[in-house]
Amino acid sequence: MLQPLIDPTFSEHSHGFRPGRRAHDAVKAARAYVQTGKRVVVDVDLAKFFDRVNHDILIDRLGKRIDDAGVIRLVRAYLSAGIMHGGVVVERHLGTPQGGPLSPLLANVLLDEVDKALEARGYSFARYADDCNVYVGSIKAGQRVMALLRQLYAGLKLQINEAKSAVGSAFGRKFLGYELWVAKGREVKCAVAHKAMDNFKARIRQLTRRSGGRSMEQVVQRLRPYMLGWKAYFGLAQTPKVWRELDEWLRHRLRAIQLRHWKRPATIYRELQARGAGDTVAKRVAANSRRWWRNSDGLLETVLTIAYFDGLGVPRLS
């Protein structure tokens, strides 16, 4: 009901929780700004944004966009609805309901004021929900923007997380899980940020850790949704070598899991021969049955090949 009325009034620099817009659009905008030479970023992180939204300020800003007292009352009731804490309903005076369908839209209503202030001054920026990056040509200009943002956010009773916010090189900061790098010809490209990469590996380890008793098909079934979603989100990354290395690491891990499933040398020997391994290869792999990780490289790759994992439905990242 509110989205069609309000959304057209938002800044073009706002990409989060809007029809036809997504995180990829914000990352592409950031890359384009840096490509033009604006290689200093003002990277702002708001401390517990959704928990600290001031109801009175938000309702005031909403009232300037919607001339309907009934709708305003409903939104106020939505914001003020009590939350359960220790079995007791506690009144809410700050923040928006976590996971509530209106919360992202209301966040855009509140933060649009900052967007418009940046627009009026001609700044290049991209915002997705409470993540906002402003791109400028020098550290000094960035410091001026940071001072402006502190003032603007303070006016909305929001607080900048100083530990996570900074003015620095656009190539040294992450934005929505991505980071930027310079390729040959000075072309600015996207890569998966190191933290996002570490999180990916940690999640894969978690999904495959307790694999005892489950077939490889069941392990892959657990992996597929996460891998496909991750690949789709990070599809902008322009790092073929990194993708290949991740693929190799993942298949190495799956081979180790397969050996652990078979466990005994006789079983390993039998299963490898059933998959087309020669007698010499099957014997050498089976002879090192307890060295799961080291044994999962080299000879085993000639049997549990890329095509083997393709057949199981393991998504390729590269």
Image: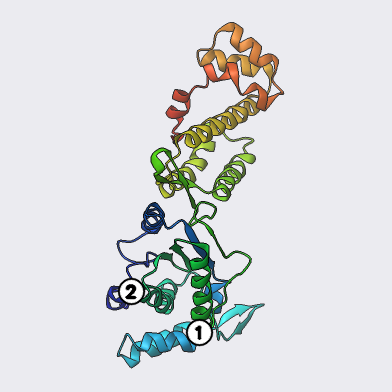
Q: Quarter holding the C terminus?
A: top left
What's under tag 2, amino acid-wise?
Phe
Mark 1 highlights which residue? 155
- Residue 264 position, x and y percent, is 69, 20
Left or right of 198: which side holds 108? left
Residue most extreme to the top:
279
Residue most extreme to the bottom:
69
Q: Residues within 10 Å of mark 2 (few under 14, many from 20)?
A: some
- Distance, label 2 to label 1, CA atoms, is 19 Å
At 39% from the left and 76% from the top, the residue drawn is: 112
Asked if residue 232 is positioned above or below residue 156 in the image, the reply reads: above
What's under tag 1, amino acid-wise?
Gly
- Residue 278 position, x and y percent, is 55, 8
Left or right of 174: which side holds 282? right
Tell me whether circle 2 and circle 1 mark residues in contact (CB < 8 Å): no
At 50% from the left and 84% from the top, the residue drawn is: 155
Give me the disc on residue 10: 2
- Residue 114 position, x and y percent, is 43, 76
Asked which secondary structure carries label 1, the reply is: helix
